Image: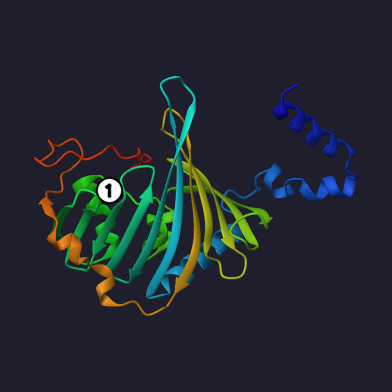
Amino acid sequence: MSKTLTLGLCLGMMVSLAPPAAMAQNAPPPAAATAAAEKLEPKALDLLKAASAALAGAQTVSFDATSTYERVALNGQPLFYSSVSAVKMQRPDKLRVMTLGDGTPDEFYYDGKTMSAYIPSLELVAIADAPPTIDKLLDEVWEKAAIYFPFADVMASNPYGELSKNLHSAFYIGRSIAVGGTTTDMIAIAGDDAAGQIWLGAEDHLPRKIAVVYAHEPAHALYQTEFSNWKLGEKVEATAFASEKAAKAKRIEFYPPGAPKPPAAPIPPAAPQPPVDKK
């Protein structure tokens, strides 16, 4: 008998022998079993608005985001890719994203006038004029170079507005103590293009985890981002949003998806990114 099967049988016996009170303690909250009668439950919307207010009300925000997404290998088995991003922003026009992961590490800088995408390992940088706000930047970097941040919604000036676009279902699931090292409120939301679940800190309302499935993706893969190390309202030095090394690196051009790549040194393939419907 394999160790895996043995472990599975032991776990099954533990559940079957557990007293009713213990089993009930680990059972899904009642709200998770059946969706709320109202398609847009007020409690769920109020929690999303509270999270939006907490994020939008801070002039400076920093956090770490661990994003995981699924792809299918040639033999059919699922593969999981991860990236870890250290994010620092100052509203309305400063942003830095430092990313490590299963692909090539990269750095992104935006100072309100220019945006730079830098690959330290190759000493390559793309620099271009940038729009005047983070909101507009997030659209432009997608159009120029298919750069997408999985945590873009929490960086918007109105996170609730982004999360509630085309929203046709939202309900409160219950509370969890399994995510982010704190008590969280769980909310389920669904729209035209995606369905997801959000874990928000019960006290500070800050996101601790977001899990999403995209409706029009053939694989129906799960994408999730876990948030940690939140810091709101702390002073950020202006030098944080630029890099001397990036400024001295070899220049290449930003280019839109599908366009011929400009001449440049070869770049190692990065891990695939989740699909985004930019309407």
Q: Give the residue type at disc 1.
A: Ile
Tell me which residue sits at (72%, 24%) in the image: 2
Depth check: 27 or 116 in front? 116
Q: Is residue 201 above or below residue 256?
A: below
Q: From the viewer's perspective, tell me whether residue 179 is left or right of residue 155.
A: right
Find residue 193 and report its image quarter. Answer: top left
Outermost residue toward the bottom in this view: 235
In percent of width and height, residue 3 lies at: 72, 28
Q: From the viewer's perspective, tell me whether residue 261 is left or right of residue 99.
A: left
In percent of width and height, residue 120 lies at: 24, 53
Q: Is residue 58 visible?
A: yes
- In the rendered image, the quadrant that contains the C terminus is top left
In percent of width and height, residue 101 lies at: 39, 47
On the image, numbered disc 1 is attached to which residue? 147
Q: Is residue 134 above or below residue 122?
A: below
- In the rendered image, the quadrant that contains the N terminus is top right
Q: From the viewer's perspective, tell me whether residue 6 is left or right of residue 66.
A: right
In percent of width and height, residue 110 lies at: 24, 64
Tell me which residue sits at (56%, 70%) in the image: 204
What colour scheme governs how the chains and residues are painted in the rendered image of this protein?
Answer: rainbow
